Amino acid sequence: MTALAALIRRDIQIALRVGGGALIGVLFFLTVVVLMPFAVGPDLALLTRLGPALLWLGALLASLLTLDRLFTADHEDGSLDLIVMSRTPLELACAAKALAHWLAAGLPLVIATPVLGLLLNLDATATSAVALTLLVGTPALTFTGMIGAALAVTLHRGGLLLAVLVLPLSIPLLIFGVAASQAAISGPLSFGAPFSILCALSLASFVIGPFAAAASLRHGLD
Amino acid sequence: MTLTDLANPTRFLTLTGRLLPWLAASTALLLLIGLYQSAVAPDDYQQGATVKIMFIHVPNAWLSMFVWGVMSLAALGTLVWRHPLADVAAKAAAPIGASFTFLALVTGSLWGRPMWGTYWEWDARLTSVLILFLMYLGLIALWRAVEDPSRAARAAAILTLVGAINLPIIKFSVDWWNTLHQPASVMRIGGPSLDRAFLIPLLLMALAFSLLFLTLHLAAMRNEILRRRVRALQMMQASQRSA
Amino acid sequence: MRLSGRGVRCVRGGREIFSGLDFEASSGEALAVTGPNGSGKTSLLRLIAGLLTMAGGSVDLDGGEAELTLAEQAHYLGHRDALKPALSVLENLAFWRDFLGGAAFDAAESLAAVGLDHAGHLPAAYLSAGQRRRLSIARLLAVRRPIWLLDEPTNALDTAGQALFAALMRDHLARGGLIVAATHAPLGLVARELRIGGPS
């Protein structure tokens, strides 16, 4: 098995076995989305209008929560030292870890979206639009978030600091993700325009994320 | 057969091993009778045949709360009386309770759809069941998060009891929230006095599902005991020296 | 192969730990780094491994593979064991064998060489401290690299474990390997001493 495949496989195995398993991210997503109507009121029309926004916010927060452990676990048990000393470039190792994280934590959110769409009274078009934007957006959330995770790895208050660092970087994704979903539901803007920008942001994060994360990790190893 | 006898896992395994086939058979029989009675019950003048979903929805909703009650008792058993099988009972009950809650939600959603036009209305009763479902899932996540079963047991016991206290509070809050925004819930089971024709199938199904819970619970407890034995054996094997 | 350091200087957290340090070790040789706690033994190993940046001086490797860095030809056995409790013993070892790259050997045999073959399929969480150390040592066998950087390797090992590891180290040296080990206790093999921070 190649080095990167072994790393992805290991990270997914750990994510599935440890703690509440992979589904705890989905459970959090579900809880946050259920929470919203209690604040906003059970008016179905309002919930439908807010639906894409609520789902995006829930997915963003759920991704964020699981990002905390992306590098800290390896740092604490000394695995990070060995990863740096391997014959695989650190940038690729970071990308592999982010991919594993998305598969174990981000993709389940996308799969859970239709069920949550039901709770928010979204119709099939709306739910598919949101699910599609999340499919493109959640990898970006992970790859952007890993920068914060790498920066916060040596810090003890990591969790909150990570959120403060990553949330501003995620704003463009949030804007275009929700805009694309709304466009699919009610027009007049076309779905294609904001969606393409979302895709572009995602692709950019696949490159920027690993490089920035690797640089932070090397800096933080001391 | 006293409670202290049942405290011995081996004796528990032997006893339940003999009991389970009978329980399973009685459950199956009672379910069949109950389903038949439900099928032949008359249609509701307003809702038509869809009212019969009630015969599955209502028992499941009752059981979802009843199982939390069982877990609360088990939690007291763990924290107060330190009964050895209490945490096994609690851990085994959680997924079963969650399943009943999930069934209550799905059947409730299907029952409401013809009336509401959507699969979900933020109806006070169903919303409370949804919150209960989330609490079950959280409890299961807690059980799985701690590797050592006895440490997990104490944490889960505390959460279960806190949940039990909170459930009436949550129910009250959700009812209040609902009346703020909407007229009264449309989910009726026939008002204060249920027509006798509906009552018998309902009670039969309730009994059948309760028996189903008992069967599944005992089977799950057996599995958990065996699982812990495997774990103990593995730990023993790990500490052996090889040549 | 020759590993050498000239005028190495280490600064951590604004404090200078040591400076002007010279050392060398060749194939088949072991260098035992000794000194009181806090003298910088761990820091020196991390400097050589590339995990810490040098504040001055240089560390060079003559011989070895030209396209690889020093770190990529070295094993680092630190205080922490790089073990994932959620994975089994064999899964842990197989991962490092696949990930580190280079000459890889059978994971099961490596486990047997450190006396852990009976525990291969068990969760790594069930291992004692000494067994975890042995699993880390198995990593050194599962992937062959010429340079071993060891930080108090016999920590947590019982007498049998220490004898076993001493034998493995001698094998490594006999194959042309090179060892730099920070240690308080005798290693059980012939080694030159490098004393940091304190009288000899």
Image: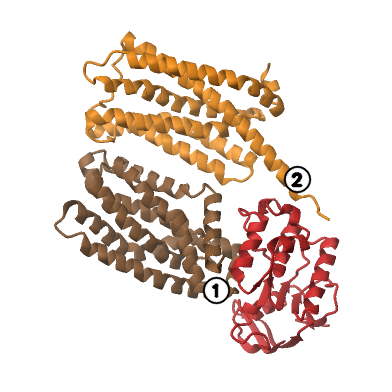
Chain colours: A brown, B orange, C red
- Provide residue A1's location: percent of width, then percent of height: 57, 65
Image quadrant for the N terminus of chain B? top right
- Say if C98 sits above or below C120 in the image: below
- Provide residue A151's location: percent of width, then percent of height: 48, 69
Foreground pick, C16 / A199:
A199
**Rendered residue at 78%/73% (across/down):** C183
**Rendered residue at 38%/35% (across/down):** B130
Foreground pick, C43 / B32:
B32
Query: Which mark lies nearer to you, 1 or 2?
Result: 1
Which element is circle 2 on? helix
Which residue, given by chain and number where applicable, does mark 2 sit on? Answer: B236
| Residue B119 in view (yes/no) | yes
Which residue, given by chain and number where applicable, does mark 1 sit on? Answer: A88
The quarter holding residue C150 reads: bottom right
Q: Residue furthest top?
A: B196
| Residue C83 in view (yes/no) | no
